[in-house]
Structures are given as C-alpha cells and as structure tokens.
Amino acid sequence: MGVRVKKGDTVEVIAGDDRGQRGQVLRVLPKENRVVVSGVNLVKKHQRPVRAGRGQIQPGIIQFEAPIHISNVMPVCPHCKEPTRVGFNRSEDGRKVRICKRCNQTF
C-alpha cells in the first residue's frame, strides 16, 4: 500500500477537538498509524528537574504536540487548497505518484 500522508504535507484535522485546523506533518509513526501535526493536539507535561548523568532537564510545564490518529487527518491538495482523498497513478518514468481526487493533479 502507498503512503497517503508524508512528512511535510499540509493536512486538515477532520475529527476531534482540533477539527478544522490545518498544519504541517512533523512526524509520521506508521507502526502506530499516527502523525504529529504542528499546532494540533497540544498537551502540557509537568516536568520535574532531573540531574541524571550528563545534563539537567529544564523543569516546568512543557507544551508539545501529541500524535493524532492518521484517520483523523486529511491531506490538503497544494493545487486546489482543499482537503482531499489521495489516489495513486504511475508516472511516465514508472514511479508511483499520489494524485488529488478532486483536481487529478499530482502531489
């Protein structure tokens, strides 16, 4: 099966608390079927100071993006700027390319 969402893609959240937000994919976790999207699913972690080994961890409240399930995001086509489903075609040189199901452009 092809990869529908890649690192660097712009995606829109279609389900959950952050529905409607857009952001870039920072990481893809294929084994867990999850992606990390910038500015989406922000969580706070209370970090206590730890002096283990080499360095010291900065204490305080750290805010970061948590992974979101890949079924809750939809890629945004760079040509028509709309959330779209992804199809696959073969290019002239035989490579498998992703296409927008709305405008049939490759991305």
Image: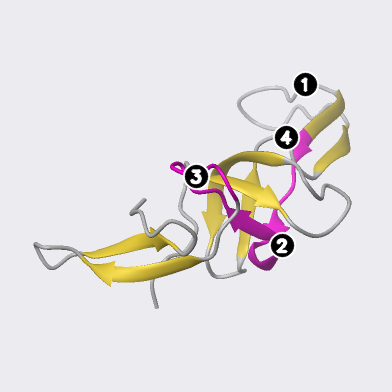
Q: In this view, does 29 lie to the left or right of 104?
A: right
The magenta-colored residue range is: 64-82
* C-alpha separation, residue under disc 1 versus residue under disc 2: 33 Å
Q: In this view, does 3 lie to the left or right of 83?
A: left
Answer above or below: position of 54 versus 43. above
Which residue is under mark 2? 72
Q: Which of marks 3 and 1 is nearer the N terminus?
A: 1
The numbered dot on residue 39 is: 4
Kind of residue at disc 3? Cys
The numbered dot on residue 80 is: 3
Residue pushed farthest front? 103
Whether pointer 4 and pointer 3 mark residues with C-beta atoms closer than 8 Å, the reply is no
* C-alpha separation, residue under disc 4 versus residue under disc 3: 23 Å
Q: Picture coordinates of residue 16 (x, y %)?
A: 85, 57
Q: Which of marks 1 and 2 is nearer the N terminus?
A: 1
Query: Closer to us: mark 4 or mark 3?
Result: 3
Answer above or below: position of 30 versus 79. below
